[in-house]
Amino acid sequence: MLEVLQPSFDKHHFGAVKGRSTAHALISLLHERMETLDAEGSVRTVFVNCHKALDHVDYSLLINKLLS
């Protein structure tokens, strides 16, 4: 299924894409930031860790909502 959708993904999408990894995401992020800085632009980045937020999800409730 992902093979069908993959051509429509943004070039910065790395999750669940065959052949792409966290390392690819970090390299892409650093490359774009360095290009911007080389062009004397400014860079602002916000990183958000949502891992703990997902620990509190009631998955049975979520599945029931998706099914309905």
Image: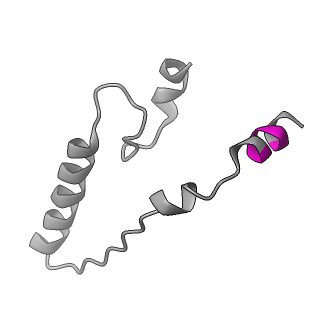
Q: Is residue 26 magenta?
A: no
Q: Position of residue 58 (x, y in %)?
A: 70, 51
Q: Main secondary structure of the magenta part?
A: helix
Image position of 3 with respect to 52: above or below: above
Q: Is residue 68 left or right of residue 28?
A: right
Find the residue positioned furthest to the right: 68
Image position of 23 with respect to 46: above or below: above
**Nearest to the observer: residue 17 or residue 64:** 64
Number of disc labels? 0
Q: Residue at x 27, y 48 (%)?
A: 25
Q: Position of residue 51 (x, y in %)?
A: 46, 57
Q: Which residues are magenta?
A: 61-65
Which color scheme does this rendered protein use?
one colour
Q: Is residue 37 left or right of residue 46?
A: left
Q: Is residue 62 magenta?
A: yes
Q: Position of residue 16 (x, y in %)?
A: 43, 33
Image position of 63 with respect to 1: above or below: below
Q: Quadrant of the N terminus?
A: top right
Q: Image quadrant of residue 57?
A: bottom right
Q: Position of residue 21 (x, y in %)?
A: 28, 38
**Nearest to the observer: residue 40 or residue 44:** 44
Q: Residue at x 15, y 63 (%)?
A: 35
Q: Quadrant of the C terminus?
A: top right
**Nearest to the observer: residue 20 or residue 8:** 20
Q: Residue at x 51, y 33 (%)?
A: 8
